[in-house]
Every structure is written in structure tokens, then in C-alpha cells.
Amino acid sequence: MSGNVPADPETLARVYRSLRLIRRTEEEIARIYPSDKIKSPVHLSIGQESVSVGVCDNLEASDVISATYRGHAAYLAKGGDLKQMMAELYGKGTGCAAGKAGSMHLVDMGANVLGMSAVVGTTIPVAAGYAFALEREGKGRIAASFFGDGATEEGGFSETLNFASLHKLPILFVCENNGYAIHSPVKQRWATEALCERVRTYGIPATHLGDDNVFTVRDTAEKAVAAIRAGEGPQFIECKTYRWREHVGPAEDYDDGYRTRDELDAWQARDQVAATGAMLNDALRQSIDDEVESQIAEAVDFAEESPWPEPEELYSHVFAD
Ligand SMILES: Cc1ncc(C[n+]2csc(CCOP(=O)(O)OP(=O)(O)O)c2C)c(N)n1
Ligand SMILES: [Mg+2]
């Protein structure tokens, strides 16, 4: 495993805990899904956790993030409430969006997680708008926006880069390049793979990471966040990563013919959850694992036992008060 392993054991334990929580939560979601208790489609981040964890480890609680319909990892890495997330997937009234939104539209403003969207690319300009507000607020808070490789093909992506650079907005753009938009590989969609070169033409410093080593992501994000906080304007990170499961749903899809299991094997060999766990002593790893399991079990119980939303709930959050 490449990358700088952090000297301080607290960081190592914190990063592992976050990775493990996301992985195990999504494995539980995949396990429960066939029971039909989960009422919304699920886009799992299994295999991609380290991008969210490495970036969010550099953010303050008061910083803001945006993400996508594949948003469980970013939501949890930023400190979004797990019980409310699980209840939201179940469509329960205690969910983070009162059971009306499901997995693709998570939100937790208590943790400064902006509402997510199923419409590709749309949360990028929203995050920049929020960064604009944060800049005017003048308290040093920043925004980070997570999106996929496919989202960079949307017009709003380019418009947002230009606006953010022009106004030196305090925003970190994070492209999770998992190589596919649904079943279409990047090679069939991009004239060149030089995404960071394209981004630099907007005057935004951009770093390409060839794999998703969590500590490399963390180090890169640390520098980017420091530059943003110093008032230098936006920064961009493109991180290659890999989605282990199907685009939407709990299963694998290596028989669908658009990608091969060999590709998965190469990424699984450097699984960041396992690799980071292996850096801890057995007793500490076990205690973190146990804690994570009980946190997830509690969240599942909470979702199962929570009431359905009241019919009147249909009319709340429709218009601003
Ligand atoms: C504007 C828009 N166009 C098309 C779709 C259909 N769609 C849903 S997910 C997706 C792929 C997006 O790929 P990427 O941004 O790489 O994210 P990933 O799913 O790989 O995380 C597409 C095309 C959509 N939801 N919104
Ligand atoms: Mg993608």
C-alpha cells in the first residue's frame, strides 16, 4: 500500500472507524434490501469509501458538503446521523428527510450535509452557491462537493468551475472517478482522460490521484483545504476509485458484460478498509468493529421500529416558510 501512513494512532483509529462504519452499513443495506423493507433504490459506495473519508477527515463540523445519489459514504464520513439515514431508507417518518426522499436524497444540516440529488451534476452548483454564501459570511468555513466522473460531462460542471474560480470561492471539488457512468466506461465518453488539465484552464489547481489510498487522499485534501482556507480560491481533486457492486442495487454485475471481474480483483487487492484495519493492533481493531456493529444494529432497530410518516407530512417542506 502506497501513501503516507499517519504517525498518530488517533488519526489511524478514527480513519479506520469511519471506513469500517461506511462499509458495514452498506453491507447491511445490501443484506436487508431483498426483504423489501428498504423502500428506495440504493446506489452503494462499497469500494469507494476512502475518498469521502480521506477528504472529510480534513473538514470541520461547520464546513459543508454536497454529494450525489451515491451519497451514503459522504453523509457518514461528514458525521451525518446513521439512525436517521437508515430510517430514511425505510421510508419512515423519523428519517433525515421525514421518509419522503430515500437513499438518493440524504440531508443532515445538523452535520452540514446539503441535500443530495438523483439528477447528475446538480449538486455541484448548489455547493458553489453555498460556498459563495460562506465566503460572504466571513467565518472561514468552506464547502466540499463530491461528484462522479459522469457529472463532469454536465454543462453545470464547467459553468460552476468558471464561477467558483472567478469569485475565488472557498470550495473543494472532488471527482470520484470510478471509471463508469452506469455501464459506459470513461474511454467511450471522454475525448481525453486529462480531466485535471481541463480543470486547470479555469485557473483551478487540480491534483490527479491514480488510486484511492485513504492516506494519500487525506494528505492531498489537507493541502487543498489549507490553500482554500488561506483565501486562494477553489481546488480540485480527481481520485480514481472503483465501485464494487452494480450501479444501483445490492448485487454484483460482473456478468453484465461491460466490465470484468479482473478489474475488481485489482481494486479489492488494495481494499482500503482491510489495509487500514491491518495497521491497528488486533484488540483495538476488534473494539472498533464491535462498536460499529452495535451502532449499525441500533440504527436498523430504530428504522424498523419507527412509525410511517403521517399523511399531513406530504404538505410539509414543499414551500419555504
Ligand atoms: C441529468 C441526468 N442525466 C442522466 C441521468 C441518469 N444517470 C443516473 S446515474 C448516471 C451515471 C452518472 O455517473 P457518475 O457521475 O460517474 O457517477 P457514479 O454513478 O459512477 O457514481 C446517469 C447517467 C440522471 N440521473 N441525471
Ligand atoms: Mg462514475
Image: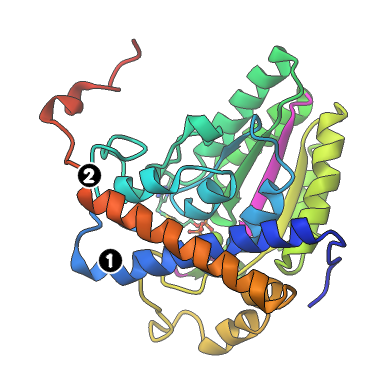
- Give the structural element (helix, strand or loop) at label 1: helix
- Vertical position of residue 252 compared to residue 120: above or below: below
Magenta stretch containing residue 172, yes or no? yes
If the image is split into quadrants, where does the C terminus sit? top left
Taking the image as shown, residue 39 lies to the left or right of residue 12, namely: left
- Vertical position of residue 16 compared to residue 77: above or below: below
Q: Is residue 248 or residue 27 the one in the foreground?
A: 27
Within the image, what quadrant is residue 28 found in? Answer: bottom left
- Give the structural element (helix, strand or loop) at label 2: loop
- Vertical position of residue 159 compared to residue 2: above or below: above
Rendered location of residue 300, percent (x, y):
32, 56
Q: Earlier in the sequence, mark 2 or mark 1?
A: 1
Q: Is residue 15 or residue 45 the one in the foreground?
A: 15
Looking at this view, name the residue that lies furthest to the top.
Answer: 321
The kind of residue tagged 1 is Tyr
Taking the spot 74% from the left edge, 29% from the top edge, the residue there is 170
Taking the image as shown, residue 257 lies to the left or right of residue 272, namely: left
- Local packing at callout 1 (Cα closer than 10 Å; few below 14, some 14-19, many 20+) is many
User: What residue does disc 1 label?
Assistant: 33
Within the image, what quadrant is residue 19 found in? Answer: bottom right
Within the image, what quadrant is residue 287 found in? Answer: bottom right
- Local packing at callout 2 (Cα closer than 10 Å; few below 14, some 14-19, many 20+) is some
Rendered location of residue 209, percent (x, y):
77, 62
- Span highlighted in magenta in the image: 168-183
Looking at this view, name the residue that lies furthest to the bottom.
Answer: 262
State the CA–CA distance, disc 2 to disc 1.
18 Å
Residue 306's disc is 2
Residue 4 seen: yes
Taking the spot 59% from the left edge, 38% from the top edge, the residue there is 65
Rendered location of residue 49, percent (x, y):
59, 62
